[in-house]
Image (cartoon, rainbow, N blue to C red):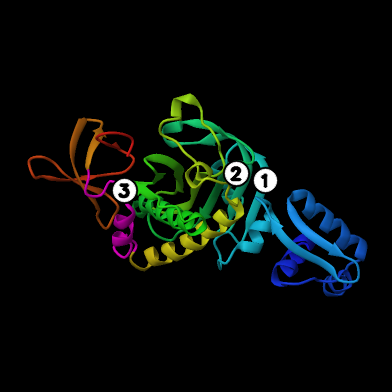
Amino acid sequence: MNLKDEILKYLKQEQTYVSGQELCERLGVSRTAVWKVIRQMEEEGYRIEAVRNRGYRLVESGDVYTEAEIRSLLTTRWAGQNLIFLDEVDSTNNEAKRQAEQGAPEGTLVVAELQNAGKGRRGRSWKSPKGSGVWMTLVLRPEFGPECASMLTLIAALATETGIRKVTGLDCGIKWPNDIVVNGCKLVGILTEMSTDVDSIQHVVVGIGINANMKEFPEEIRSTATSLAIASGGPVKRAELVAAVMAAWEQYYEIFLQTLDLSLLQDTYNQRLVNCGREVRVLAPRGEYTGISHGINHTGELLVETKDGQIREVVSGEVSVRGIYGYV
C-alpha cells in the first residue's frame, strides 16, 4: 500500500477523529506528508473534517473514483487485488491483454476513468466518457481448455448483475447471454477475449462496461440504453460497483471451477434471465425464427422451443436474440 491507501484505510476504520500525530507514528512519516495527502484526498472528492487538537475525520465521499478508493473497498482474495488504475486508455481490454502478455498474474484488474477506443462485439468501438461509467477488465489464467471459455461471459453477467443489485437495489436482469438490462434498456456490455495455444489457454480478459452516471445517450441508442443514475434517480458510487462486482465474480467463478460448467449456477442465472419463459426472436445466420425461451442449459446455450415443439440450443456468439416487441 502507498501512503494514501494507508491513511484512507485508517480514516475509514475509525468512527471518530484520528490525530495527525497518531498517523505520523503509525506510518513513519512527517506531519507535512500527512497534510499533503489529506489535501489531495479533498481535491478528489472526500469530505474530511480537520479539528485542532483532535485530528482528521472522514465525513463522506461522493463518487470518488481512484485507485486508493477502490482498494479500500475490495474484499476479495485475488480478484482485483493487482489493480491497475488509469486516467485514460484506448480500451481496458487492450491494456489487460498487454499486461497479460507481460506476465500479469491472474486477478489483475485494469480500470480506466476514460476509454478513447472502447471495444464491443463484432469489432464495434465507442468512446467511454470520463466521470460517467465503469470500464474495467479482469485477467484470468485458467487451467481448463478453450472449450469452457464461452461460459465465462455468462459468469461475468451474473456477477455484474449481482454487484449492481447490491450497490443500487435496482431490479435489473440479464438478457442472454451477457447484457444487463433494467426497464427494458441496456445497462452493461461485456466482452470476453481469449489468447490460446494449440489446446490450452494463455489468458482470458473479461471486459465489463457499466453505464453508471450517464445522463443522456446518442440518438441512435437512446431508445435501448440507460444508466444506473437514470434508473435509480441519482448518481452511484462507481468504486463501490467495482468492489461489489469483483466480490461476486470471485464467488461465482470458484463455483464454476468445481464442475467446469454452469450446472451449479444454472438456476441462479435463469432466475435473473429476463427473457426466460418469454417469446424471443433468434437472428441466426441461416435465417431468423421465433420460439419460447426456457433458459440456459449447463453449458450456457439458450434453450428455445419452436412452434413445432423442437428444442433448439442457441450458441452465444453465433446469433442475436431479441424480444418480440423490443430489445428485451
Q: Which residue is label 3 attached to?
A: 274
Q: Earlier in the sequence, mark 1 or mark 3?
A: 1
Q: Quadrant of residue 131?
A: top right
Percent x, y of residue 40? 81, 52
Q: Earlier in the sequence, mark 3 or mark 2?
A: 2
Q: Which residue is label 2 attached to?
A: 95
State the residue in front, 122 or 225.
225
Magenta span of residues:
260-278
Q: Earlier in the sequence, mark 2 or mark 1?
A: 1
- Image point 53% across, 59% down: which residue? 244
At mark 3, the secondary structure is loop
Percent x, y of residue 93? 54, 43
Percent x, y of residue 117? 57, 33
Is 323 above or below relative to 1?
Answer: above
Percent x, y of residue 39? 84, 54
Alpha-carbon span between mark 1 and mark 3: 34 Å
* Image quarter of the N terminus: bottom right
State the residue in front, 247 or 186.
186
In the image, which is nearer the foreground, mark 3 or mark 2?
3
Magenta-colored stretch includes residue 143: no
Q: Looking at the rendered structure, which numbered label has been put on residue 86?
A: 1
The outermost residue toward the front is 233
The outermost residue toward the top is 219
Disc 3 marks a residue whose amino acid type is: Val
Residues at marks 2 and 1 touching, judged by CB atoms closer than 8 Å: yes
At mark 1, the secondary structure is strand
Disc 1 marks a residue whose amino acid type is: Leu
